[in-house]
Each structure stands twice: as C-alpha cells, then as structure tokens.
Image (cartoon, helix red, strand yellow):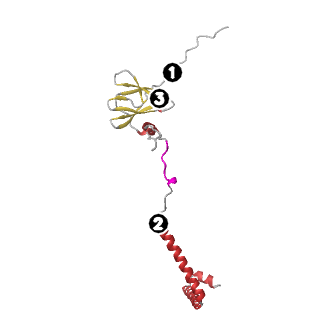
Amino acid sequence: MSVFSYCCVGDPFVILWLMQFSLATLSEYWQAAINDRRLAISVLLLVCLLLLVSVGRSIDLFIPKPVDSSAAYQPPEKAVAVNPAEIARWHLMGEADVSSLPTTTLALKLTGIFTGADGQQATAIIKVGDDPERVYHLGDQVSAGVVIVKILPMSIILKANGDMQQLPLQQQQLQFLPAPKRLGAVKG
C-alpha cells in the first residue's frame, strides 16, 4: 500500500507527517533562496511588480471612464405618433379570460353581432329594455354608466359602473319541421 492510498484512508498521523515534511522542505528551499541574494532580489522585485499591477487595476476601477458621445442614446429624428387606443389593442399584459366574467343582470338583450377583420369594425345589435333594437359599436354607451368594451363572436363585454360583465348572444334552438310525406311516385 502506497503512502498516498494510505493517506486517502484518512489516518491523521500520516496526514500530519506529510504536512510537516512539506513545510520542512519548503522552509529549506526558502532558506537557500535567501542565502542567494540574486534570487531573493528577483523574487522581491517580482512580488513588488505583481503588487503594483494589482493596485493599479484596483485604482482603475474607481476612475470614471470618458463616455463616447456617439454611443450615447440618440432620439429618433422623426417622432412616431402612436394612438393610445392602438397601444391598448396590443394587450401588453395579456388578455383577460372573459369566460369567468359574470353575466350581466341589466335589462339588455344581445340579438346580433357583426365582427370585422379588426375589432374596430365590429357592431352589436342590442335591445335595451322595451326599446327597439339598435346598432352599437365599440366604446358606445348602451345606457347610463354602461359602455361596450369588447365585441366577441358570441358575446360582448360591458363595463357597467366600473364592473366588467358579459352579455351573451341570445341563441334560439333551431326547430326542424318533419319532412313532408310523399304523395305518390311521379310517373314519366
């Protein structure tokens, strides 16, 4: 068994012996280096040089560097006008899940929806109370404190006195008549 493998087992006496041997060997080499003046002076100069480089780099960290003015932010030559309503359609924070909105209890009945390629052309046909049906667009006020916020294919989103509510499209179940009975075969 070698000394290294014996040391790996973890005998503390062997580890201490190796440390003492290493320190004694280093001490002897250092004493020999001190006795040789040329070697001692060159080691001392090397240590001083490394110390100066280290201090120079540390000082360089605290000295502000001149800023290149060409790399600084330059505003665009022509400002681009952006409509705030356009920014709202970008949905920067994502779109709300409208399926979880409560259905409105207002006296409104959505009878028709027309959607276009973009949301601005969408229209909704709404009956308010006993009044006749009217066509409304996005942002229109349906009644006091009730504004259309969004028009979807099967419902609209309303903002009623600060609360978001949905008004679903009233759908009637289709009723099919039975097929007519055949009267007789056509002769020809």
- The residue beneath circle 3 is 121
| Residue 107 image-quadrant placement | top left
Viewer can see residue 18: no
Residue 78 forms part of the magenta stretch: no
Q: Please, what secondary structure does the residue beneath circle 1 have?
A: loop
- The residue beneath circle 2 is 63
Name the residue nearer the viewer: 15 or 43. Answer: 43
Q: How many numbered circles are shown?
A: 3
Q: Residues within 10 Å of mark 3 (few under 14, many from 20)?
A: few
Q: Amino acid at mark 2?
A: Ile
Counting residues from the start of the chain, the first of labels 1 and 2 encountered is 2
The prevailing secondary structure element of the residues shown in magenta is loop
Q: Residues within 10 Å of mark 2 (few under 14, many from 20)?
A: few
Residue 13: image location, x then y, percent: 55, 87
Q: Amino acid at mark 1?
A: Phe
Residue 164: image location, x then y, percent: 37, 37
In this rendering, would 38 be left or right of 165?
right
Residues shaded magenta = 69-77
Name the residue nearer the viewer: 103 or 54. Answer: 54
The structure residue drawn at horizontal position 58% and vertical position 11%, both measured from the top left corner, is 183
Q: What is the spatial separation of the Cα atoms under label 1 and label 2, in whole angstroms?
A: 87 Å
Residue 176's disc is 1
Tell me, yes or no, whether the two marked residues, 1 and 2, touch with CB atoms within 8 Å: no
Tell me, yes or no, whether the two marked residues, 1 and 3, touch with CB atoms within 8 Å: no
Tell me, yes or no, whether the two marked residues, 2 and 3, touch with CB atoms within 8 Å: no
Position of residue 68 relative to residue 6, above or below, is above
The quadrant of the image that shows the C terminus is top right
Position of residue 94 relative to residue 155, above or below, is below
Q: What is the spatial separation of the Cα atoms under label 1 and label 3, in whole angstroms?
A: 34 Å
Q: Please, what secondary structure does the residue beneath circle 2 have?
A: loop
Counting residues from the start of the chain, the first of labels 2 and 3 encountered is 2
Q: What is the spatial separation of the Cα atoms under label 2 and label 3, in whole angstroms?
A: 60 Å
